[in-house]
Amino acid sequence: MAELETVEIEPGASIELGIIWLHGLGADGHDFEPVARELDLPFGARFVFPHAPVRPVTINGGMPMRAWYDILALGPGGPEDEAGIRRSADAVRELIVREIDRGLSRDRIVLAGFSQGGAIALYTATREVEPLAGAIALSTYLPVAANLQSEAKAASRATPFLMAHGSLDPLIDISFVPLSRDLLLAAGYQVAWRSYRIEHGVSPEEIRDIGGWLAGLKVVA
């Protein structure tokens, strides 16, 4: 996969944290730009919003759109585009390395994502050889869950995770998401959980909670 194009927001102050935020299916890197400004963080953070490549998506009739991987079916137990998931995770790792080259250590980098982007954030963060500052997964699930025990890196268990979901989500059922959360907990991960009475999106309350969670990370205390 070619290097991902990105949208970036630089802070006016010194950079304490780098946040790589992955959009959902069919969106692009501009999707969460407004959220970056609404988080009201008490420190300087660089936001990096990559654009997923355009590809055909099976569940949408093969229509080409920005997607981190093909979606073959919805719900647990269905076939998954494991090769596409791995390619996107590799591309995200290149962005992590780029942040390191720009002066941030891994423990000052947060990987975040919404929906399909959140799935890539979970997949990538659990396979990092060193802990990240944190990982945020919104309205999503852990892909290729059966491989977690064999592929997860021991050091990644020191990364704090935040998972949040809408209880009225018509796309990713609320009963499905806790399966991923519980699998991560059983594997030794630190997972903070939030649920909101919303559909497939984010709410002002959720944004405030994300900002508070980021502000509480030890690396920026």
Image: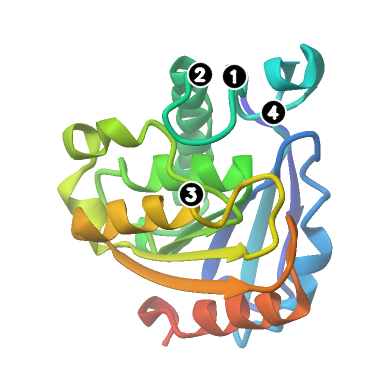
Give SS at disc 2: loop
Mark 3 belongs to which amino acid?
Answer: Phe
**Dot label at residue 176:** 3
- State left or right for residue 185 relative to residue 161: left
Which quadrant is the N terminus positioned in?
A: top right
Query: Tags 3 and 1 in contact by the CB under 8 Å rule?
Result: no
Q: Which residue bears the numbered disc 2?
A: 81
Is label 4 or label 2 in front?
2
Give SS at disc 4: loop
Query: Tags 2 and 1 in contact by the CB under 8 Å rule?
Result: yes
Residue at (45% x, 85% y) in the render:
216
Query: Tags 4 and 3 in contact by the CB under 8 Å rule?
Result: no
How far is disc 1 from disc 4 in space, using C-alphas? 12 Å
How far is disc 2 from disc 1 in space, using C-alphas? 7 Å
Is label 2 or label 1 in front?
1
Is label 4 or label 3 in front?
3
Packing grade of label 3 (10 A; few <14, some 14-19, many >=20) is: some
Q: Position of residue 214 (x, y in %)?
A: 52, 77
Q: Is residue 209 above or below residue 135?
A: below
Task: State which tag comes first along the sequence, 3 or 1.
Answer: 1
Q: Which residue bears the numbered disc 4?
A: 67
Give SS at disc 3: loop
Is label 3 or label 1 in front?
3
**Dot label at residue 72:** 1
Task: State which tag comes first along the sequence, 4 or 3.
Answer: 4
Task: State which tag comes first along the sequence, 2 or 1.
Answer: 1
How far is disc 4 from disc 3 in space, using C-alphas? 21 Å
Q: Position of residue 87 (x, y in %)?
A: 49, 21
Residue at (64% x, 74% y) in the render:
196
How far is disc 2 from disc 3 in space, using C-alphas? 18 Å
Query: Tags 2 and 3 in contact by the CB under 8 Å rule?
Result: no
